[in-house]
Amino acid sequence: MTPFYTIRFPAALALAYGLSGCVGGSDTYAAAVTTATATSGAAATTTAALRSAKYDEDGFDTLAGEATAVIRRFDMWKPAEAASVPLSGAATYNGIAAFGDNASLTQINAGDPDALASMALNVNFGTARVTGSIWGFRGKDGKVGDGSIALKGLQDSTSVKASGSSTIYWGDVDQDVTVNIDGFFLANEKAIKGTMANTLEGPRGQDIQQGGVIILNRDTE
């Protein structure tokens, strides 16, 4: 399975690292930098500019706990009926976006999605416009992703769609990410859940398609 983030670095360092599509532990990465620096002056200059990856060992589990709480609350709720969706007013929804082909709304844990992030959507029922953001990325290995993805879209009856693109900075890795969200309201518009179709930048600049899911809880009227 392709990880949410993939390595993009100079060829000399790539050869020393011996990988083209996955992220290793910090000890392996440090060894690769040491090897490249020792064998090439140019590589030494380049690798010196590389940023170090940041880790938050509890971050992924914290987000997983938040997602699980929302899932349990709305697990038995049915999709909203079109007649119940208001024609005016606005609501804000907060929750979790889970990235990965194996991500699901039935089990969020360390062996499931590749990465989790906080997410918010504001739905204006009068104009049918949707805005929001995804931020606070955490890989299942504890790696921290800085940056955010601004979202824009439309609400159509019970459907909520939004998309956005940005660069997420994983310390030693910069990754372009595009998300396309296809969601729907649960009963009485108290929550939104849905799926994501994501395009991630691969190790050679190629596009990698990956899935994902969202679960959001309404927190303002």
Image: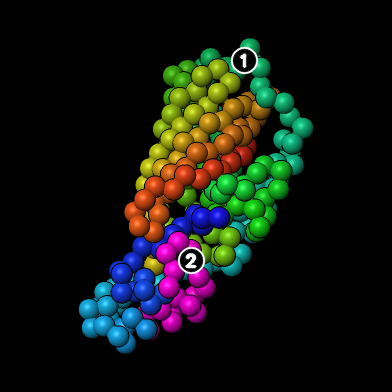
The answer to whether residue 178 is left or right of residue 45 is right
Mark 1 surroundings within 10 Å by alpha-carbon count, few (fewer than 14), some (14 through 19), many (20 or more): some
Q: Is residue 10 magenta?
A: no
Q: Using the numbered discs, state the Cα–Cα distance from disc 1 to disc 2 in whole angstroms.
A: 45 Å
Q: Confirm whether residue 76 shows in the render.
A: yes
* Percent of width and height locating residue 34: 37, 84
Q: Residue 72, relative to residue 56: is it above or below?
A: above
Which residue corresponds to mark 1?
82
Which residue corresponds to mark 2?
23
Which residues, given as a range, are shown in magenta? 18-34
Residue at left offset 61%, top offset 39%: 215
Residue at left offset 46%, top offset 57%: 5
Which residue, as the protein is rendered here, is positioned at the far top? 83
Classify the position of the N terminus by image quarter: bottom right
* Amino acid type assigned to the residue bearing label 1 in the image: Ala
Quarter location, residue 195 = top right
Q: Is residue 32 magenta?
A: yes
* Amino acid type assigned to the residue bearing label 2 in the image: Val
Q: Confirm whether residue 51 shows in the render.
A: no
